[in-house]
Amino acid sequence: MVTIGISKWTTESAKEMGKRFVEMKPIPDFIQVVGPYNYPDDNEGITAITIFKYDKNNSVEANAAIANLFLIFYGIPGFRYSLKLAAGTATTLKMFGFE
């Protein structure tokens, strides 16, 4: 399974984001993390995209760990995030009735 984390913050909050980022607790070993990849987002500040991969047997624990990962950033002005559960091509085709 894959969860995509998308977070955004203002450039004025970048120093505080960096400070809290290095204070983050490690994520459980059963979750593979790709990223974060950061880029400037026009006049909105900075956007970061992180991909979390895990086995569906661990999905409950993985979702809780991923959601809790972002709690350290609460209270930073302009910080916001979203988590998107993503499916691969085979799963998506199956949802649309293709076998």
Image (cartoon, helix red, strand yellow):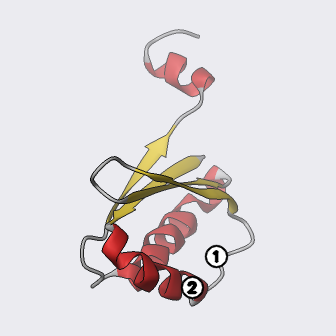
45, 8: nearer the viewer: 45
Residue 48 in the image: state x and y as whole percent: 48, 57
Question: Where is residue 89, by image quadrant?
Answer: top right
Residue 9 in the image: state x and y as whole percent: 34, 66
The quadrant of the picture occupied by the C terminus is: top right
* Callout 1 secondary element: loop
Residue 64 in the image: state x and y as whole percent: 47, 71
* Callout 2 secondary element: loop
In the rendered structure, which amino acid carries the disc numbered 1? Ile
Left or right: residue 95 versus residue 57 is left
Left or right: residue 9 versus residue 6 is left
71, 37: nearer the viewer: 37
How crowded is the residue under tag 1: few (<14 C-alpha within 10 Å), some, or many (20+)? some
83, 1: nearer the viewer: 83
Residue linked to disc 2? 24
Q: Residue at x 37, y 49 (%)?
A: 41
In the rendered structure, which amino acid carries the disc numbered 2? Met
Task: Find residue 27 and name its label.
Answer: 1
Most extreme residue toward the top is: 98
Classify 15 as above or below 44: below
Q: Residue at x 68, y 75 (%)?
A: 28
Q: Residue at x 52, y 19 (%)?
A: 94
Residue 26 in the image: state x and y as whole percent: 66, 81
Classify 98 as above or below 51: above
Question: Where is residue 77, by image quadrant?
Answer: bottom left
Q: CA distance from mark 2 to mark 1?
A: 9 Å
